[in-house]
Amino acid sequence: MQIQRRDWLKVSSLALMLGWADISKGASLMAVRVWPAKDYTRVTLESDVALKTKYTFVPSPPRLAIDIEGLELNPAIKEWVGKIKPDDPNITGVRVAQNSPGIVRMVFDLKQAVQPQVFALTPVGAYQHRLVLDLYPTAPVDPLESWIAERTQSNDPLSDWLNKQANATRPSASNSPTPPAEANAPANPPAGNASITDRLIIVAIDAGHGGEDPGAIGPNGTKEKDVVLQIALKLRDRINASSVKGSPMRAYLTRDADYFVPLHVRVQKARKVQADLFVSVHADAFFTPNAQGASVFALSHGAASSSAARWMAQQENKADLIGGMNFGVKDSQVQQALLDMSTSAQIKDSLNLGGAILREIGGVGRLHKPKVEQAGFAVLKAPDIPSVLVETAFISNPDEEAKLSDPNYQNSVADALVKGLQKYFERNPPLARKRST
């Protein structure tokens, strides 16, 4: 019995020493990524083990200090300071130092006051443990006001109309929302006296994935998030140069650069600018390289229209997990947006929109399915906006991956999409109506 006890003590001591050795080794920082955007700046620290942190925000001058346990300062950590670009809208610079043994302090010098969100993500997909620092401006970016500023800077003749819309949708002093006004808008007017139309058509374009979420990756390394953004930008330009029966069309992008936008925020942005339609642009992928062709999806009230559509929705709905949504935020708007807010009328209109787009895309290349498919895509759940998700091609197919990277193919897809939108509105003219904000 004594021998067994000695052996047990030896094993216990060995295990204890190994445990302390692992702790003394500390965490290894695998990567640091910075995603600047007007909405917010995200900093992601990826490590082989979970990191523990404490942070403090100092308002004047604005700076954020974060102490990270389990790290020792080394040249690799210092190198990432150079990842902060001068045009970052929120961060001026970063300083790092060994605050105490086993604790590295990072101080972010900021351009404005922020409301930081610091949270950890468990391993998912290709990522190990991630510590995420989201730096949101204290005065949040309003999608409508930001869009107005963009149109004004580009000397868009509709900027006056957009300003009227913004004034009509701003909350009153009592904080009760004012119903948006249906104002008049000039239809591509010349200088001086402008011709007047009573309707502006707003199309929300949603480039899928972004930032931490690359989407599908082709066999040659092409990332879905990159090619769909390129297509979305081309589509924006075409929409802004188009009209339907005298009504000018204007595009709003839910993201215009490489950063992560949660699925429900994409829907919220489209509703904020009172979009008439919502088009989410993606590139399909499958287990084998043989799958090919474009597809169009609408929301489903219940079961998906096929097992393939259900699988596709499941893949796309993982974007929040991979991109890194902070599910710990107690936000009633977030909780409400995650509910199924679909309506039968919205789904019917979405199917009509999808059919118009599918017919035009069929002239560009092969269709994967000859009809609009339906499934529970989270990004299509705006209750008052007809919404479709377009899979432009299979990025997992080497031939279609090459096409997706080809500007000529991207132009053809953008041309087909805008034609589909125009034909939908020719058959379904937008009505003057009040929307909830």
Image (spheres, helix red, strand yellow):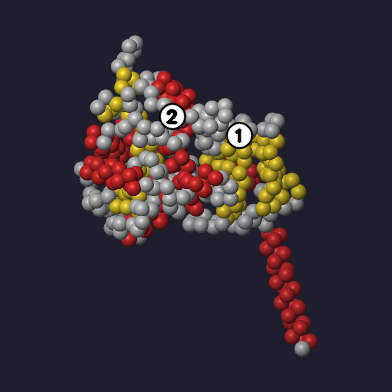
Q: Which of 186 and 262 lies nearest the eye of the viewer? A: 186
| Residue 196 x/y as whole percent | 31, 19
Marks 2 and 1 sit apart, C-alpha to C-alpha, by 25 Å
Q: Secondary structure at mark 1?
A: loop
**Residue in the image at 42% along x and 37% along y:** 270
| Residue 139 x/y as whole percent | 58, 32
**Residue in the image at 35% along x and 22% along y:** 185
Asked if the residues shown at circle 2 and circle 1 are in contact, with their CB atoms under 8 angstroms apart, the answer is no
Q: Which of 123 and 384 lies nearest the eye of the viewer? A: 384
| Residue 315 x/y as whole percent | 41, 55
Please, what is the three-letter code of the amino acid marked with disc 2?
Pro
Q: Which of 244 and 218 lies nearest the eye of the viewer? A: 244
Mark 2 vs mark 1: in front: 2
The quarter of the image holding the N terminus is: bottom right
Q: Residues within 10 Å of mark 2 (few under 14, many from 20)?
A: some
| Residue 265 x/y as whole percent | 48, 42
In the drawing, what numbered circle is on residue 381? none
**Camera sees residue 149:** no
Q: Is residue 212 left or right of residue 348?
A: right
Q: Residues within 10 Å of mark 1 (few under 14, many from 20)?
A: few
Q: Secondary structure at mark 2?
A: loop
Is residue 227 placed above or below 157 in the rendered structure?
below
**Residue in the image at 47% along x and 33% along y:** 143
In the drawing, what numbered circle is on residue 138? 1
**Residue in the image at 34% along x and 41% along y:** 386
**Camera sees residue 133:** yes
Quick one: which residue is furthest to the left in this view? 363
Is residue 164 placed above or below 5 in the rendered structure?
above
Q: Which residue is mark 2?
A: 180
Please, what is the three-letter code of the amino acid marked with disc 1?
Thr
Quick one: which residue is furthest to the top in this view? 192
The disc, 2 or 1, on the residue closer to the chain's N-terminal end is: 1
